[in-house]
Amino acid sequence: MRGPIALVLAVTAACGGGGGGGGDDTPVSDAAALSDAITQQGLIVNVVALPALPGEIKSDLTVTSVVFHVQRLQVIGDNGQPMTSAAFDLGWQGEGTNPSPIDFPTAPSGLYSQVSIEIDASAAAPVYEIFGTVKVGGDIEMFHIRDTENLDIDITGYNVTLAPGQSAIMGVRLDLRDAIDGIDMGMLPMMMGRRTLETNDAQMSEFRDKLDDAFKRSP
């Protein structure tokens, strides 16, 4: 799915915040990050970046800042569909730091199968931004990706049971490697000293599709 990313996380949601995309069974270890969430109660959505952000995601390709402006995050279960009550930013800034887990303390018990996220902002602002560096023609250059079109993401394939009075985790993993590596950086215009991919660029449609797939289900 698609439609209309700053280094630190600011979460201002009464009961939650974000993730979405397609299911993925690639072996990956994020148990340490998930362990941070187990002290919370109810249903918890835990978002981690692998490879870690900010940092090098491929040889000669580094992401230095990511922020998504999240309008709504919703978990889909057989007994209810709790959602966040306020917009918030989902981002990565500190070295090796992931966003705080998103807690739905009053989520009804039952089986949960999906996380849906709406990334959106005002018409005049980008809904997400990504900054980084990349090698182009032998030189290291800065790049900037910004988009004003909203992005609707669904992560499916969960089989998470929340028992009465217990907690359960729905893990989300963000992997930006394929999405960013798929951009022909040498074809992007220079704006304020950066290779810049914007909403109306010819490469943006394919990038959005890959960004959708960059949000994956974690074990």
Image: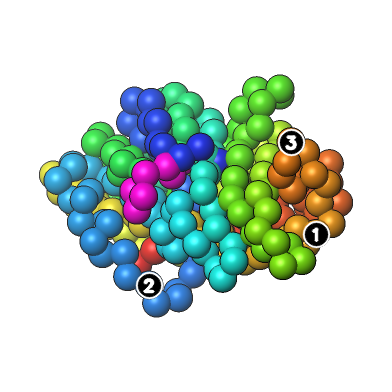
Mark closer to the observer (1, 2): 1
Q: Residue at x 24, y 53 (%)?
A: 168
Nearer-the-camera pick, 209 or 200: 200
Q: Which residues are magenta?
A: 91-98
Residue at the bottom extreme, as displayed: 27
State whether residue 25 appears in this view. Answer: yes
Image-quadrant location for residue 149: top right
Neighbour tally class for label 3: few under 14, some 14-19, many 20 plus, Cα within 10 Å = few
Measured along the vertical axis of the image, is residue 6 above or below residue 37? above
Q: Where is mark 2, residue-wise?
A: 28
Q: Position of residue 214 (x, y in %)?
A: 56, 59
Colour setting = rainbow
Earlier in the chain: of badge 3 and badge 2, it is 2
Q: Distance from label 3 to label 1 (Cα)?
A: 16 Å
Q: Residue at x 51, y 37 (%)?
A: 6
**Quarter in which the C terminus is drawn:** bottom left
Q: Are marks 1 and 2 in contact (CB under 8 Å)?
A: no
Measured along the vertical axis of the image, is residue 65 above or below residue 123? below
Q: From the viewer's perspective, is 159 left or right of 106?
A: right
Q: Where is mark 1, residue-wise?
A: 186
Q: Residue at x 61, y 54 (%)?
A: 133
Q: Main secondary structure of the magenta part?
A: loop
Badge 1 amino acid = Gly
